[in-house]
Image: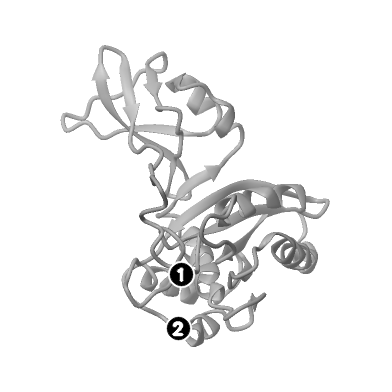
Amino acid sequence: MIRAYVGFDDTDCLDSDHGTGKLARWFKREVPEGCSIWGVVRQQLLVHEKIPYTSHNSSACVVVEMNDLGLLDDLVSKAARHLERHALDGSDPGLCVTHEDDPALPRLIAFGQKCTNQVVTQRDALEATRNMHLSGHGGTNDGIIGAAAAVGLTAHGWSGRFIEFGKLRDLPERVRVSELERLNILAVSLDRDGQVPAPEDLVHTKGWLRPRLWGNRPILPIIPRGNSVWESLGEKRRTGNNQDKVHLLSA
């Protein structure tokens, strides 16, 4: 199987009913025959006063497994149509698509890492994606920056969190370590003393199970909360009355 990366960014606006993450997750219904979704990863980019964004300046990458690289053009076409169909008026959507064997991928990875700590431009994104697919689909086209960054960071395999992976969203609030492992999610202890979770231990997810992308696989960081009970790190962000939606462009 060949792994392809489809990056989306800047598809929503203030008070919209869906953001870039949800748009990326919906793409699983659109992939060509011969392709399947391995996972969808949210990537956090730099939050800076010079960067316009909707809420948190994040973008999303859909990781697609395909049995033939010849399907890549069809994947690009379907991703572009999906983006144009679901991106909201007033957004500046962008799309980036490449695959794991692209010899220029290290350049894109370096660009993605730069986007987490520096202000970059569309020209930088275009340079990083030479001979790859990068396209803007409305407005200022600023979404090409985040879309390219999402692909680079996800391809690197050491940042971001899964917002879709198998039956991730169907699991109960308390789930056994062995069940997570059966679903290819590895629970990793962050206990200072190195305590290790047993297969029958319970992990309390607080109703928000979001493994990290570490070492190119889903890793769930957990901390001990009692005898044979653990708690996953992180929880759903409470935004109140959109008080933290201070900019206008990305997801």
Ranked by sequence position, the earlier of labels 1 and 2 is 1
Residue reaching furthest right? 33
All told, the count of numbered labels is: 2
**Quadrant housing residue 60:** bottom right
Is residue 174 found left or right of 41 in the rendered image? left
Q: Is residue 122 depicted above or below 207 in this figure?
A: below
Q: Residue at x 55, y 84 (%)?
A: 126
Residue placed under numbered mark 2 in the picture: 121
Q: Residue at x 38, y 42 (%)?
A: 238
Q: Is residue 1 visible?
A: no
Q: Residue at x 40, y 80 (%)?
A: 120
**Quadrant housing residue 83:** bottom right
Q: Which mark is residue 134?
A: none
* Residue 175 picture location, percent across and down: 46, 20
Q: Is residue 182 visible?
A: yes
Of 187 and 246, the residue lying toward us: 246
* Residue 116 picture location, percent across and down: 36, 67
Is residue 2 found left or right of 73 in the rendered image? left
* Residue 72 picture location, percent across and down: 74, 65
Front of the two marks 1 and 2: 2
Amino acid at dot 2: Thr
Residue placed under numbered mark 1 in the picture: 109
Amino acid at dot 1: Ile
Q: Residue at x 50, y 69 (%)?
A: 249
Circles 1 and 2: CB atoms closer than 8 Å: no
Task: Tell me the SS state at disc 1.
Answer: helix
- Measure the C-alpha gap from mark 1 to mark 2: 16 Å
Label 2 CA crowd tier, 10 Å (few <14, some 14–19, many 20+): some
Of 190 and 239, the residue lying toward us: 239
Is residue 141 found left or right of 210 in the rendered image? right
* Residue 48 picture location, percent across and down: 32, 71
Task: Tell me the SS state at disc 2.
Answer: loop
